[in-house]
Image (cartoon, rainbow, N blue to C red):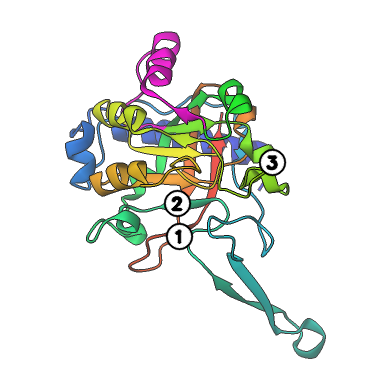
Amino acid sequence: MCHQCVIEGVKKTMLSRRALFTGAAATGVAGVAAGLAPARPALAQTGGRVVDLTHTYDSDFPTFDGEPGILTEEAVNFEESGYQLLKLTLFEHTGTHIDAPLHFSADGASVDELEPQNLVCPLCIIDITAKAADDANATVEAEDVEAWVSENGAFPAGALVAMRSGWAAKVGDPSFRNDEAGGLAFPGFATSATDLLAEQGVLAIGVDTLSLDPGNSADFAVHYSWLPGGRYGIEGLNNLEELPATGATIFVGAPKHRGGTGGPARVLAVI
């Protein structure tokens, strides 16, 4: 299929989704927690430019616990069999990946139970790169959310709000995960921000670091407050600097293994 045909196909799909979501019911946290798609506005008009928000990862990619998140083994050799096949040993929370509600709750939705319409969202980006340059454990606070709204207007219903800290550029360097003393150190969200986002009908949050919580968190407060409410998160986003603060649409290619707490995802933005 030609490149122009693909672009036109994307446009038609986006316009079709706009019509689908016009007049949808269920708003805010109650609707999300009940597994219902919140009312959402038209998705972004696009010129067809796709930005890959996903890191390529292997066994050297940094993980929260420091252990390899994926191991690769040759299962079938091309010279011997005429085709090739790899065997993967994979931990769910590695690379660019999704955190399902079940990750931090006893009975939350598993990754295969996430509603498909909740994986295509308006994307809003809160930039804290200046703050993170001075503090490795900087957080998105309520005042950052309020400042974003003051500048850009209200968050679209059903939006995914991503933190841009500049941390994606550190992948491959020890400072992506640790401070000079060896402790976990990276930016994340504060509950003051996520509580406010939940009140405003935001569906999901994302970070360009290893965790929704900052590295020095002792209680995973954001994980425990955000995910059990029926919402999800994405960790390890890439290339957020290529996108505007608002106006893009994010597509979350979540895995669908039964009972999963999350898993590696191919995440794309269209602008």
Which labelled disc corresponds to residue 59?
none
* Residue type at numbered disc 3: Lys
Q: Nearer the viewer, mark 3 or mark 2?
A: 3
User: Looking at the image, do the residues carrying marks 2 and 1 touch, with CB atoms under 8 Å apart?
Assistant: yes
Which residue does the numbered mark 2 point to in the structure image?
Answer: 98
**Quick check: can you spot residue 263?**
yes
Measuring 69% from the left and 61% from the top, which residue is drawn there? 60
Residue identifier under label 1: 255
Question: Height in image: 213 above or below 159?
Answer: below
Q: Give the percent coordinates (x, y) of residue 99.
A: 41, 52
- Answer above or below: position of 7 versus 81: above
The amino acid marked with disc number 1 is Pro
Sooner in the amino-acid sequence: mark 3 or mark 1: 3
Q: Determine if the magenta segment contains residue 153.
A: yes
Which of the labelled discs sits on residue 170, or is there none? 3
Report the span colored magenta. Answer: 138-160
Q: Are marks 3 and 1 in contact (CB under 8 Å)?
A: no
Instruction: Tell me how far mark 3 sits from mark 2, CA to CA.
Output: 20 Å
Q: In this image, 82 relative to 189: left or right?
A: right
| Image quarter of residue 24 | top left
Query: What kind of element bears circle 2?
Result: strand
- Location of residue 15 in the rendering, given as x and y in whole percent from the top left corner: 42, 31
Crowding at mark 1 (Cα within 10 Å: few <14, some 14-19, many 20+) = some
x then y, percent, for residue 77: 75, 84
User: Which-is-in-front pick, marks 3 and 1?
Assistant: 3
Q: Position of residue 172 (x, y in %)?
A: 72, 49
